[in-house]
Each structure stands twice: as structure tokens, then as C-alpha cells.
Image (cartoon, helix red, strand yellow):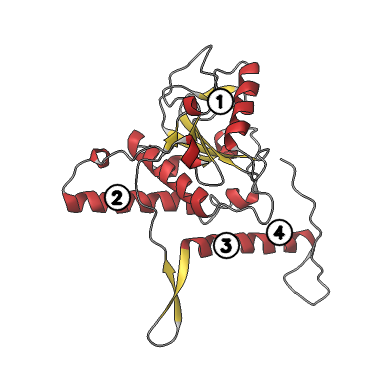
């Protein structure tokens, strides 16, 4: 992944914290951290006229609305299929996806490319578009691919976008769809949120994600914490209702291709 060329800010104004590249990187890290905090909290006015930070409610725990691969792909799985026993989840970005383009067209091209490389199907199990639409890739029963190798123990989730540009953040519907999908998979397969990994930690030699997505895993551990909050809220709700399993709730109707795009 090639980082964009960005000019260093000037230090002529006497900013003591700015010292060449290190100072610039420190500013970027601080900006990303504050952006993450702002995305997970809001300001609330108090009776005494002051303001305090208020944490946003966790995303609700629901079975994701997933568009099946048969609804947008003309090709199907073929070749060698290896059974998957998931014990972790890996998240990656797809930087060659052009913002504003059709996710179905992109995934059709990706499926064709993957099969020409000897893979059985799309490499990842799920893909999340910038509009927050979740599309099915490889079937959960079978191994996806990290690079050219089958991943025998991980469910693979691709987030469409490069997250390199300062304006390209994980926000809104895409963030909600990612958190809800991860929470659902964690519950379904008894995977703790601590076992959600960025791709560069899960696969040796893998290219790291764009900084605006990688920062959700950094020192703030924001993505795992958001998944934990969703799962904890669901556990409290189920205990209050006296239910033993979240999967007793009704499956939400899947969106049609026409309504989703």
C-alpha cells in the first residue's frame, strides 16, 4: 500500500511539538485518536452550564442483513474447498476499491481474478461497502484466503476503501455494519472480541491497512471495544428477558439488490 505524498507542515510559527517528520506523525496520530473519540462519544450540556463527554449507545445486536453471493455473482465456488473451524476474525481494507463505485461490479471482478489465481471463490467471507451494505463472499463453512494461502482458523472481513485519504474514515453506516457483523460472528462462533485482528497482525508479510482504519485497532482498541459493548448490551437484554440465547430472535429480512443499492 503506497502512502500518499503529503507536504510536512511548517514549524516557523514556533510550534514546539513540531520537529520534522516525527512531529508531523505525532500530529496525525493525535488527530486520528481525537477523531475516534469523537466518533464514539458526544458532548452533553449540564445544568450548571458546563459540558461533559457522553459515550454513545452501543450499536444494537442484530443478525446482519447480508446480500447473498448468488444475488450479485454469476460464478460459484469451485475447485478445492477446505473446511473452516473459526477461532478468530481478521479485518482488512480493500484500497483498490474506488469510492462511489458499485461494490457488486468490484466483487465480480475480484472473484474472476481470484479464480484465475487458483482460489475457489472470493478470498474473504464478507465485504462491507461504504454505504454499510454487507455482501457475502466465501461461504462460512470453507476457508478464505490471506494472500495465496487458505486461512484455516479465521473468518475474513473486507472493508471496501483505502482509508489513506484524510477524508476517508470509517464512519456512519459502514462502521455500524462492521461492528454489528463482528458482534454477530463473535456470538455465533464463541469468538472473544480480543481475537479480532487487523490483517498485518494475522498474516506475516501482509500489507497493513490504511491509517484511518488501522487506528481503530491501535492503543485505543476502539473496534474491539465497540464489539464488546454491543455484546455486553445484548447479554444484559437477554438476562432481563430471561432468554438463554440471542439467536431466538427473529431473523431480519434480507434487503433486495434493488433496495440495497
Q: Judging from the image, what secondary structure is the residue with disc 4 in?
A: helix
Residue 148: image location, x then y, percent:
62, 22
Q: Which of the two discs, 2 and 1, sits closer to the camera?
A: 1
Q: Which residue is mark 1?
A: 122
Asked if 89 appears above or below 45 in the picture, the reply is: above
| Mark 2 Cα-neighbour bin, 10 Å: few <14, some 14–19, many ≥20 | many
Q: Judging from the image, what secondary structure is the residue with disc 1 in?
A: loop
Q: Earlier in the sequence, mark 1 or mark 4?
A: 4
Q: Which residue is mark 3?
A: 35
At a point 82% along the width and 68% down the height, the residue shown is 10
Give me the C-alpha separation between circle 2 and circle 3.
Answer: 26 Å
Of the 4 image quadrants, the one containing the N terminus is: top right
Q: Which of the two discs, 4 and 3, sits closer to the camera?
A: 3
Residue 159: image location, x then y, percent:
56, 41
Q: Which residue is mark 2?
A: 234
Asked if 241 appears above or below 80 in the picture, the reply is: below
Query: Image quarter for residue 49?
Result: bottom left
Left or right of 205 on screen, residue 181:
left
| Disc sitting over residue 25 in the figure | 4
Residue 177: image location, x then y, percent:
46, 46
Q: Residue furthest top?
A: 79
Q: Judging from the image, what secondary structure is the residue with disc 2 in?
A: helix
Instruction: Identify which residue, 97 or 214, lies in the foreground.
Output: 97
Amino acid at each position: 500500500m503506497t502512502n500518499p505524498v503529503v507536504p510536512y507542515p511548517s514549524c516557523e510559527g514556533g510550534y514546539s511539538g513540531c520537529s520534522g517528520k516525527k512531529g508531523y506523525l505525532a500530529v496525525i496520530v493525535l488527530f486520528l485518536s481525537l477523531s475516534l473519540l469523537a466518533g464514539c462519544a458526544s458532548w452533553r450540556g449540564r445544568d450548571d452550564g458546563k459540558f461533559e463527554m457522553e459515550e454513545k449507545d452501543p450499536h444494537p445486536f442484530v443478525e446482519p442483513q447480508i446480500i447473498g453471493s448468488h444475488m450479485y455473482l454469476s460464478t460459484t465456488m469451485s475447485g478445492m474447498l477446505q473446511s473452516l473451524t473459526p477461532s478468530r476474525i481478521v479485518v482488512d481494507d480493500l484500497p483498490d476499491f474506488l469510492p462511489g463505485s458499485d461494490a457488486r461490479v468490484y466483487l465480480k471482478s475480484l472473484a474472476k481474478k481470484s479464480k484465475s489465481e487458483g482460489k475457489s471463490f472470493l478470498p474473504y467471507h464478507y465485504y462491507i461497502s461504504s454505504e454499510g451494505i454487507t455482501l457475502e463472499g466465501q461461504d462460512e463453512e470453507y476457508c478464505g484466503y490471506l494472500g495465496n494461502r487458505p486461512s484455516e482458523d479465521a473468518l475474513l472481513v473486507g472493508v471496501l476503501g483505502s482509508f489513506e485519504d484524510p477524508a476517508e474514515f470509517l464512519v456512519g453506516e459502514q462502521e455500524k455494519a462492521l461492528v454489528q457483523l463482528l458482534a454477530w460472528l463473535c456470538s455465533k462462533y464463541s469468538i472473544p472480541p480480543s481475537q479480532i485482528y487487523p490483517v498485518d497482525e494475522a498474516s506475516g508479510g501482509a500489507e497493513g491497512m490504511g491509517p484511518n482504519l488501522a487506528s481503530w485497532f491501535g492503543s485505543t482498541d476502539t473496534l474491539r471495544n465497540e464489539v464488546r459493548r454491543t455484546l455486553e448490551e445484548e447479554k444484559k437484554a437477554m438476562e432481563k428477558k430471561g432468554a438463554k440465547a440471542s439467536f431466538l430472535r427473529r431473523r431480519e429480512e434480507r434487503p433486495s439488490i434493488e433496495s440495497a443499492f
